[in-house]
Image: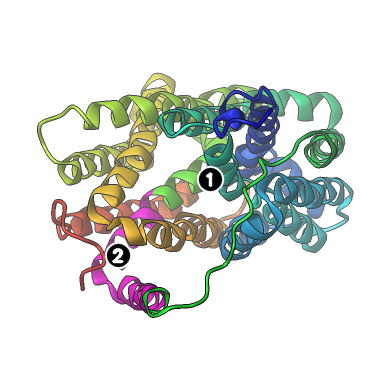
């Protein structure tokens, strides 16, 4: 009996593929922000300073961003499930290495290995879901994937702090490495890609040559577009500052500003990813129904985000725990909404033939932003002497002031964007 062309959409194995990739993606977000909770432990264990710690943490983002073209290429060549499995083996090895690291150098190497390993998940997930799910299901499945990922960021706050207090940070990372190793083996031996129908390569013709030439021209147009680099810079600044706070400095900042223990501080830090989980679908849904253009919505979001940074940086003394909690939650909501609206803007202002290319160029920008800002803020903090293992509030104010300036620049740049004007027509 011939198989229906719609068989993959009814095959229950697609849920196995989705589940495995989603659980692996959980650890992608977990590792992005996990170092924030264990900053005091790492400073003590490695007898190091904030600059070195910021560089160590940023290795995740440098490697993650730079490998994306390779991941995309191998996803097409090997298949998405195989890439997820092999890359997860590297992530597991990085976790074990991090737990065994004797000094900050080897911790940085381990962090880079983790970044490389988890960098092979999102792009393969896009292709795998496109293979196994209908077009009308695709956006919903990606939304579920993002929710699972941000739940990983939530677990990387208070639950991680509990685990570190109970077992220590080294054993905790051994456990995470073991779970990642099991997921890698499941991906490699118990999941499969949807088989693509065999295709016969046609003899090259004038038409195909013209298409190839058009693609080359499109690459030049994309790379030469001033508007593309403008919006890439905004993406870098907004997402980079958000993850710098959430992923590295939020917990120690809250400990210093409120005089609280790590567990309590990590609970407040958990408000950022919780806000992200709510804001990403909610603001994305609202932006489709509002009467004003998405560029306008984007400017409003960046403005609110700017205000939240001013509150955290300069008004923490009188905001107190309740006020700071409100600011962190609001920051998470608008940061999540920024991602949704941002990609909506890209979709509206990018021709279909170059959408994938533009997305591939833009995707590394936020991670490079995190990598740079973590090092810069760490260097500023390092100019201050630690008290009881923590940096003083004056150091955090100086470091966060840089983030405020960056966001102010991003807000100003957003006014140079025009509604529904192509990003690649320069």
* Tag 2 residue: 228
Residue located at (38% from left, 80% from top): 206
Q: Secondary structure at mark 1?
A: loop
Q: How is the image coloured?
A: rainbow
Viewer-nearest of discs 1 and 2: 2
* Tag 1 residue: 392
Query: Where's residue 375, x and y in %?
Result: 55, 61
Q: Is residue 272 above or below residue 201?
A: above
Q: Earlier in the sequence, mark 1 or mark 2?
A: 2
In the shown orientation, is residue 419 left or right of residue 105? Answer: left
Examine the structure image and report whether residue 106 is included in the region drawn in magenta: no
Around disc 1, counting alpha carbons within 10 Å, would you say few (fewer than 14), some (14 to 19), or many (20 or more)? Answer: some
Q: Residue most toward the front?
A: 1
Q: Residue most toward the top?
A: 322
In the shown orientation, is residue 336 left or right of residue 422? Answer: right
Query: Where's residue 105, x and y in %?
Result: 78, 63
Q: Quadrant of residue 412?
A: bottom left
Q: Which quarter of the rendered picture does the C terminus lie within?
A: bottom left
Q: Secondary structure at mark 2?
A: helix
Q: Which quarter of the rendered picture does the N terminus lie within?
A: top right
Q: Which contiguous range is marked in magenta? A: 210-238
In the shown orientation, is residue 60 left or right of residue 321? Answer: right
Examine the structure image and report whether residue 215 is included in the region drawn in magenta: yes
Residue located at (29% from left, 48% from top): 347
Q: Camera-side residue: 358 or 317?
A: 358
**Residue 50 makes an appearance in the image:** no
Are the two marked residues, 1 and 2, in contact with CB atoms closer than 8 angstroms? no
Q: Residue most toward the left?
A: 291
């Amino acid at each position: 009996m011939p198989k229906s062309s719609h068989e993959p959409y009814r095959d229950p194995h697609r849920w196995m593929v989705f589940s495995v990739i989603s659980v692996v993606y959980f650890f992608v977000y977990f590792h992005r922000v996990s170092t924030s909770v264990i900053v005091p432990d790492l400073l003590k264990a490695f007898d190091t300073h904030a600059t070195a710690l910021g560089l160590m943490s940023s290795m995740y983002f440098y490697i993650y961003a730079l490998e994306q073209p390779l991941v995309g290429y191998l996803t097409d060549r090997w298949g998405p499930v195989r890439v997820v499995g092999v890359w997860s083996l590297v992530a597991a090895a990085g976790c074990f290495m991090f737990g065994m690291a004797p000094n900050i150098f080897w911790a940085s190497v381990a962090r880079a290995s983790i970044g490389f390993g988890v960098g092979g998940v999102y792009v393969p997930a896009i292709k795998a879901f496109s293979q196994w799910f209908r077009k009308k299901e695709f956006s919903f499945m990606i939304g579920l994937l993002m929710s699972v990922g941000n739940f990983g960021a939530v677990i990387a706050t208070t639950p991680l702090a509990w685990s570190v207090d109970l077992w220590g940070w080294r054993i905790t990372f051994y456990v995470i490495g073991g779970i990642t190793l099991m997921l890698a083996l499941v991906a490699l031996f118990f999941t499969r890609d949807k088989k693509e129908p065999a295709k016969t390569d046609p003899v090259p013709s004038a038409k195909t040559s013209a298409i190839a030439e058009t693609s080359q021209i499109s690459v030049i147009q994309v790379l030469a577009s001033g508007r593309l680099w403008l919006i890439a810079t905004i993406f870098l600044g907004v997402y980079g500052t958000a993850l710098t706070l959430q992923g590295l400095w939020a917990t120690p900042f809250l400990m210093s500003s409120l005089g609280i223990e790590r567990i309590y501080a990590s609970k407040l830090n958990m408000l950022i990813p919780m806000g992200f989980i709510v804001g990403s679908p909610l603001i994305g849904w609202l932006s489709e129904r509002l009467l004003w253009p998405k560029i306008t919505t984007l400017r409003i979001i960046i403005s609110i985000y700017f205000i939240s940074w001013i509150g955290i940086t300069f008004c923490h003394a009188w905001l107190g725990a309740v006020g700071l909690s409100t600011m962190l939650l609001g920051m998470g909501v608008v940061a999540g909404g920024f991602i949704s609206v941002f990609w909506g803007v890209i979709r509206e202002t990018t021709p279909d033939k170059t959408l994938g290319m533009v997305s591939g160029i833009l995707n590394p920008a936020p991670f490079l932003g995190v990598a740079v800002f973590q090092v810069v803020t760490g260097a500023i903090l390092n100019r201050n002497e630690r008290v009881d293992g923590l940096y003083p509030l004056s150091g955090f104010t100086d470091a966060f002031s840089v983030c405020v300036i960056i966001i102010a620049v991003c807000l100003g740049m957003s006014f140079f964007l025009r509604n529904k004007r192509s990003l690649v027509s320069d």
